[in-house]
Image: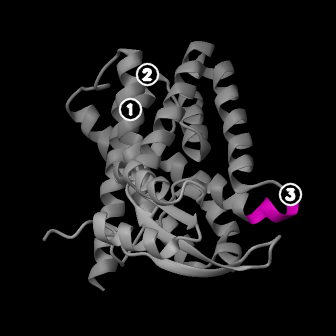
Amino acid sequence: MLDKITSKLLIVFGTILVAIGLELFLVPNKIIDGGVIGISIILNYITNYQLGILIFCLNFPFLLFGLKKLGHKFILNSLFSVTSLSVFTMLVDHIKEDFHVQYATHELFLATIFGGIITGVGVGIVLKNNGSLDGTEVLAVAFTKKLGFSVGEIVMFFNIFILGSSGFVLGWDRAMYSIATYYIISKAIDFILEGMDDTKSVMIISDKYEVISNTLMTELDKGVTFIQAQGGYTKDPKKVIYCVISRLELSQLREIVIGIDKEAFVTVQNIHEVRGGRIKKINK
């Protein structure tokens, strides 16, 4: 129960950040984001309707459509996220009117950088807590099998169309700033979702697996797992060493493995989230 309450509070905090990024940095400077938020900003400029109402109204059909495809839990979280963003966007807009403030900065470069970071961090917090602010992602998940494209490719197509369209409405200089903003937002989202640790998984295939694994456990204080495998050509039984390390420990691991077996086969992959197990060093 406490986890659910914490998750909802974090979603609210994330949407507050997005609302600030939009209302104080991006929208007043005619810079847009991708997805439904981007469409909402363009329509806000054309019709002068409140941005918060447009975000809710445009997202709602997508969420309704995805109800059967993605399940009630995700859609309800997304509906909560979108509603929260709509409310806080209108609230920030109202506060701006009360204090006669239009924007945090009129410098396009600063608006692009700081608006992108604040908005991206907010979106990342929402996504990390199983919410969503973009109905086009729901549509992409629903149609990915039918169209034969990945979710990322479908979302990218939507965003290219949206960001390109902004050039005709807001001007091509604003379209270019919007592309830069979209890139910054995506990087800020990745930072929130992946974290600062930049954790990596490593798989090592070597006949000297016992010596390597013991050295990793002793010198790096890492837990290791053996995976039973078989050579495709020789058909000989193999043991694969699997462990999770931080980016800073990768060079140490390479030195250990090469020092024991120069012929060892090593693969390294980025991973986004790790829970449980002995991931970090134990302070002795």
How packed mark 3 is, by other alpha carbons closer than 10 Å (few <14, some 14-19, many 20 or more), is: few
Please name the residue shown 80% across and 73% down the image: 234
Please name the residue shown 67% across and 69% down the image: 66
* Local secondary structure at mark 1: helix
In the rendered structure, are the residues bearing label 3 and label 2 in contact, judged by CB atoms less than 8 Å apart?
Answer: no
How packed mark 1 is, by other alpha carbons closer than 10 Å (few <14, some 14-19, many 20 or more), is: many
- The circle drawn on residue 222 is none
* Local secondary structure at mark 2: helix
Please name the residue shown 42% across and 58% down the image: 126
Query: Residue 103's image quarter?
Result: top left
Please name the residue shown 65% across and 20% down the image: 167
Task: Name the amino acid type tagged 2.
Answer: Asn
Percent position of residue 283, x then y:
15, 68
- The circle drawn on residue 29 is 2
Task: Name the amino acid type tagged 3.
Answer: Gly
Nearer to us of marks 3 and 2 is: 3
* Local secondary structure at mark 3: loop
Image quadrant in which the N terminus is located: bottom left
In the rendered structure, are the residues bearing label 1 and label 2 in contact, judged by CB atoms less than 8 Å apart?
Answer: yes
Number of numbered markers: 3
Q: Toward the viewer: 27 or 266?
A: 266
Magenta region, residue range: 142-146
Q: Dot 1 corresponds to which residue? A: 115
